[in-house]
Amino acid sequence: MSHSILRGGLREWESPLYQEAVGQFDRVADLIGLDENVAERLRVPQRSIMVTFPYRHDDYDEVGSLFGYRVQHLLSMGPTKGGIRYAPDVNLGEVAALAMLMTWKCAIVGLPFGGAKGGVRVDPTALSRSELQRVTRRYTTEIINFIGPNKDIPAPDMGTDEQVMGWIMDTYSQQVGYSVPAVVTGKPPALGGSVARREATGRGLVSLLPVAALQAGLATDGITVAIHGFGNVGRYAALAAQQGGAKVVAISDVSGGVFNGKGIDVADAMAWVDRNRSLEGYTGGGDRISNEEVFLTDAEVLMPCAIGGVITDANAGDINARLIMEGANGPTTLAADRILNDRGVVVVPDVLGNAGGVTVSYFEWVQDLQNYFWSETEIVGRLREIMSRAFDEVMSIAVVHKTDLRTAALIKGIRRVADAKLARGIFP
Ligand code: NAD
């Protein structure tokens, strides 16, 4: 780590994902000859908040204590925006890396936000609904001075959902004394949430399937797809892919996966998960497979939609898919990226592929601020338009720079942010 602010190591933010994010940034910064003063500011988050807080278990006498985080990578572009993750291994470095990715993502699709991310180190599946609510309300209270409709607007991520966003909105509103729907996105529509937000990330990803398949030399009719992760992103990506004429041959979640060469009935699998909380025991007329096997099927398209760091130098050489579309954040390591590139596999990177989520979150925020709500047709149309324009712009950069889509997307995002920072100058 030769660059000055990180000369002594990543320290507070030390984590594999943050290392990857900085490595990725440095590579692109060198490539475009980025002003070193600007680069120095973008390598580290502007604000990192770490809290610890107690919550009561359902057994009133038992009290647990948890770590919570909120990182705002960059405040120059407008309010900051990014999800809140509940997972047992969440840490400051992971959240910082994801906040940085959010900055590039918003800039790539042209949204007026800097990146942020938050998290609580807890396994949400081990909490009862009332415990989840108490954890959420106390975490919100701990970070309340840092969030707000003009400051920082959280959204769902792994382990959080519409209901959690509803509790955040209510807690914030209780504290200020009036309803503030725009403090958070991904809320239930009854609280000012946007229609089509729930499906947005998966749908946005799949809206790029025809153009990305063309780049990979694949015919879209009956194209086969394997999906890792069957939560919010994975299940709606699967549904949209199937509705678009693709054959979803493999899906998986934390409990393992299913393969059916004839195609899995996605709605049936979704109903199973709604009843049983996971895919455990589900076969869908096919065979149970492991999560690792999901990456190695003969599907033409692979969509990692669960966790980070799953496509590595250990499996990248064995992936048969010609096209990888990243729904998850950071699923591919830098080393794996190089292998996939050498093998001519087309990768639609996370910062472009999963930007549909934050795009419809932006629509939700705008609707809440205006108290004027759009129809589903308007939202889906505008989402498609933004995704497809961003893809075309990234493609043009890839052609000019003779580079892969990830590098091209990052060139676009980092340039936009650097231009804004230079135009603002330094205070005082
Ligand atoms: P989620 O909690 O709804 O679903 C996560 C899924 O991953 C579940 O099916 C879970 O069982 C599975 N999973 C967890 N650990 C796993 C493991 N070790 N192996 C295999 N599967 C595992 O989360 P989500 O909102 O769908 O987010 C998934 C990914 O997409 C995350 O990387 C998140 O940052 C990213 N993302 C989410 C959104 C959004 O709008 N929700 C937007 C952009 C990016």
Image (cartoon, rainbow, N blue to C red):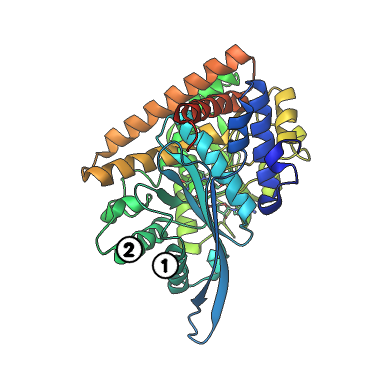
SS at mark 1 in the image = helix
Q: Which mark is residue 201?
A: none
Q: Nearest the camera: 214 or 366?
A: 366
Q: Nearest the camera: 368 or 186?
A: 368
Pointer 2 local density, CA inside 10 Å: few below 14, some 14–19, many at least 20: some
Q: Give the percent coordinates (x, y) of residue 410.
A: 57, 28
* Residue at the top extreme of this rendering: 400
Q: CA distance from mark 2 to mark 1?
A: 9 Å
Residue 96 visible somewhere in the drawing = yes
Is 326 located above or below residue 33 in the figure? below
Under mark 1, the amino acid is Arg
Of mark 2 and mark 1, the one earlier in the sequence is 1
Seen in the image, is 381 located left or right of residue 289? left
Q: Which mark is residue 137?
A: 1
Is 317 located above or below residue 180 in the figure? above
From the Cβ of disc 2, is ligand 1 less than 8 Å away? no
Q: Identify the image quadrant of residue 236.
A: top left
Under mark 2, the amino acid is Asp
Q: Nearest the camera: 204 or 396?
A: 396
Determine which residue is flagged by label 2: 170
* Residue at the bottom extreme of this rendering: 61
Pointer 1 local density, CA inside 10 Å: few below 14, some 14–19, many at least 20: some
Q: Quadrant of the N terminus?
A: top right
Q: Give the percent coordinates (x, y) of residue 150.
A: 35, 47
Q: Nearest the camera: 414 or 239?
A: 414
Q: Give the percent coordinates (x, y) of residue 123.
A: 57, 65
SS at mark 2 in the image = helix
Residue at 45% from the left image edge and 69% from the top image edge: 138
Does the CB distance between marks 2 and 1 fall below 8 Å?
yes
